[in-house]
């Protein structure tokens, strides 16, 4: 447990000293979201309806943008092989790095989501559900993304490859995340969608450490 | 372990089996298509266009079957480091992607007279589209490394992650499509289907399976020959 | 006393046999000096010893137990120093060192380790401002910041000045005097009294590919 906290602490410190990276993801999130009214037209009633979907898709893309740096720097400077040779189980080290990634990417996106909700004139009754769904869903994005980031280490065009591997796997989180918010906006219960989103989170909490460790081990062979 | 996976023995075995498998595939596909196109009755609602089903449904089955086969081969390759399992996974992926594409194309052709559009976000078709993307990712990762061994290993991990996620994706897409639209036209309710439609379907499906087997054997064989060529080149390089 | 040994190791990289039939044994306090031309597999052998790489044949044993059985236990008793220094540019020298020592459960004192490689004055300097030689010394300081029975050093003296090479030899001598063992791959002269030489050039050539395929 101590080793796990050490990893989280180190990655947070690294992220804070290079805080431009985290800001870029948030900026990307808001800017890309703000593009849609230009593409669709400023029809308030239409924007209101598609707001949850747009916010989720844009959040997903913002996370995607930040995935490459998850393991790449550690891979290139030799930290990853030292991590592999530390007494801390690699599975735990991966969870620590994912937690730090979520704290520096997912959490700022959640904080920025109300801005987009306001820009899209979303019904504020659904805002709580949107944020709750993002709280459950963005860790899933970090967890699945970690597998893609680990698998593409050392690959040609690794950064371009990650979206191809990760996006199809993001679809369930997207469906349940938007579903929860849509239900809340329609005055229905968001519970089923939120529970399903939680279930996906639990599954990925088990799958990512195992698959990630296998991927990192083979990357360092 | 790789010392025991004797490629020469595999090649001998493949050479012996291949003609029968290929012939079986041809016969089954011939009979199946004949029954499907000329013998099976037209549907009372959909008319003649229902005959697309005899290609569409077996290829959908195959697209799923091949992904599971890749996952099994990947598990074998990761646990026992058996090189033939790596080759089987590599050989299968493009074939599976082909079946997924065939499913999407026939689904689109079938949808045109049924829905009046080339594409409908129907649950089954959407799941197949995602499966097709999973195949593309697998193939891209397999070929993304200078060292082929790393490609095998990474793609194997991805295939296992994929096969765990497929039921989740399938469920979420069904959840999503029932929320947004009524049940699909492409429904095939197993037991109620008439035998005159079931038989051509099963025979075509068997033909597809044999066709896949023949293609995999052929592709593994050619991979082995390519590996041997590389090994000979390397030996020549060392000798000089 | 536990023995660190290899029996009949076969190593294969990228579909090519690097070496085959390699054996060695190393007792407590011993040193193994790997020599050989480029491409003979010195780095691969060190990575095999660390457990980063799996042999295709043969086994590496610690106290008669294969290191593949208990990879975590093996990782806990070794320090591996490869070509990369694992120094983070935005962390100070002391922060870099403290993290790795703490991860191995030794948060106590990194002062002595910094001192030994003359880094005390640079403790608060961020990694990106360190020169190549200073980064190398910081990586070497990891060896002293937390104890480990087995040191695996791949070209440890690259980029070091004369004085630092002497400090490295001194650290290795102290380590061995305390019963530690060390495996070094190097091209430059490093003072290693009674080191067993292991020349990878002298190994019989690996079997020709035709015999396998």
Image (tube, coloured by chain):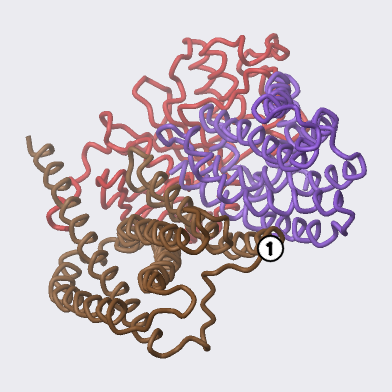
Q: Which chain is brown?
A: B
Mark 1, residue position: B175
Residue C31, quarter of picture: top left
Disc tally is: 1
x and y percentages locating residue C158 in the rendered image: 43, 19
Q: Which chain is purple?
A: A
- Taking the image as shown, residue B17 lies to the left or right of residue A132, namely left
Q: Is residue B14 visible?
A: yes
Depicted A117 relative to depicted B101: above or below: above
x and y percentages locating residue C25 in the rendered image: 39, 49
x and y percentages locating residue B106 in the rendered image: 39, 61
x and y percentages locating residue A59 in the rendered image: 70, 36
Q: Counting other residues with Cα less than 10 Å from the Cα at mark 1, is it few (<14), some (14-19), or many (20 or more)? A: some
Pick the residue in front: B104 or B10.
B104
Check the rendered structure and report the hue given to chain C. Answer: red
Pick the residue in front: A92 or A58.
A58
Pick the residue in front: A183 or A218.
A183
- Taking the image as shown, residue B193 lies to the left or right of residue C123, namely left
- Taking the image as shown, residue A2 lies to the left or right of residue A174, namely right
Residue plotted at (16% across, 67% down): B11
Residue B146, quarter of picture: top left
Residue plotted at (13% across, 57% down): C211
Residue plotted at (73% across, 58% down): A202
Residue plotted at (74% across, 26% down): A30
């Amino acid at each position: 447990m101590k080793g796990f906290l050490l990893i989280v602490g180190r990655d947070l410190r690294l992220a804070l000293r290079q805080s431009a990276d985290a800001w870029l993801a948030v900026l990307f999130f808001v800017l890309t979201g703000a593009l849609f009214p230009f593409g669709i037209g400023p029809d308030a009633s239409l924007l209101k309806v598609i707001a949850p979907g747009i916010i989720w898709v844009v959040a997903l893309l913002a996370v995607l943008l930040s995935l490459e740096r998850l393991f790449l720097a550690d891979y290139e400077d030799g930290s990853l092989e030292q991590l592999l040779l530390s007494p801390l189980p690699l599975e735990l080290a991966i969870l620590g790095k994912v937690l730090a990634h979520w704290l520096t990417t997912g959490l700022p996106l959640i904080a920025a989501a109300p801005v987009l909700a306001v820009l899209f004139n979303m019904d504020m009754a659904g805002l709580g559900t949107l944020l709750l769904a993002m709280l459950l869903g963005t860790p899933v994005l970090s967890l699945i993304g970690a597998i893609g980031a680990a698998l593409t280490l050392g690959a040609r065009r690794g950064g371009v490859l990650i979206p191809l591997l990760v996006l199809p796997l993001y679809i369930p989180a997207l469906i349940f995340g938007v579903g929860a918010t849509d239900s809340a906006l329609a005055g229905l219960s968001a519970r089923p969608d939120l529970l399903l989103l939680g279930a996906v989170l639990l599954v990925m909490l088990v799958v990512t450490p195992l698959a990630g460790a296998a991927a990192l081990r083979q990357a360092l062979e | 372990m790789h010392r025991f996976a004797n490629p020469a023995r595999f090649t001998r075995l493949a050479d012996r089996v291949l003609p029968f498998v290929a012939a079986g595939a041809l016969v089954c596909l011939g009979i199946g298509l004949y029954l499907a196109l000329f013998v099976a009755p037209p549907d009372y609602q959909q008319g003649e266009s229902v005959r697309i089903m005899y290609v569409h449904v077996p290829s959908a089955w195959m697209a799923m079957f091949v992904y599971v086969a890749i996952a099994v081969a990947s598990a074998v390759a990761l646990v026992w480091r058996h090189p033939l399992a790596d080759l089987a996974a590599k050989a299968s992926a493009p074939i599976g992607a082909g079946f997924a594409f065939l499913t999407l194309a026939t689904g689109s052709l079938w949808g045109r007279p049924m829905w009046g559009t080339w594409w409908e976000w129907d649950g089954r078709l959407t799941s197949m589209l995602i499966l097709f993307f999973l195949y593309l990712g697998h193939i891209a990762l397999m070929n993304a490394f200078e060292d082929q061994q790393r490609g095998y290993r990474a793609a194997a991990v991805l295939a296992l992650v994929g096969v765990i996620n497929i039921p989740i994706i399938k469920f979420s897409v069904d959840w999503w499509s029932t929320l947004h639209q009524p049940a699909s036209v492409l429904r095939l309710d197993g037991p109620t289907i008439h035998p005159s439609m079931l038989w051509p379907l099963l025979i075509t499906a068997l033909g597809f399976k044999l066709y896949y087997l023949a293609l995999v054997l052929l592709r593994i064989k050619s991979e082995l020959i390519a590996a041997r060529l590389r090994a000979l080149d390397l030996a020549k390089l060392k000798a000089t | 006393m536990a023995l660190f040994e290899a029996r009949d190791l076969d190593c294969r990289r990228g579909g090519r046999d690097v070496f085959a039939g390699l054996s060695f044994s190393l007792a407590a306090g011993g040193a193994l000096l790997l020599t050989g031309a480029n491409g003979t597999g010195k780095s691969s052998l060190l990575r095999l010893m660390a457990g980063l790489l799996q042999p295709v044949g043969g086994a590496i044993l610690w106290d008669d137990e294969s290191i593949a059985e208990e990879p975590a236990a093996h990782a806990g008793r070794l320090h591996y120093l490869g070509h990369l220094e694992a120094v983070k540019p935005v962390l100070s020298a002391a922060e870099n060192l403290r993290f790795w020592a703490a991860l191995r459960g030794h948060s106590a004192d990194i002062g002595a380790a910094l001192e030994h490689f003359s880094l005390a004055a640079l403790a608060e300097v961020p990694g990106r401002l360190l020169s190549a030689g200073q980064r190398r010394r910081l990586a070497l300081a990891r060896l002293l910041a937390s104890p480990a029975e087995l040191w695996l050093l791949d070209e440890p003296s690259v980029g070091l000045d004369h004085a630092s090479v002497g400090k490295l030899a001194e650290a290795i001598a102290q380590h061995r005097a305390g019963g530690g063992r060390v495996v070094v791959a190097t091209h430059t002269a490093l003072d290693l009294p009674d080191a067993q030489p292991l020349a990878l050039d002298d190994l019989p050539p690996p079997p020709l590919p035709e015999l396998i395929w």
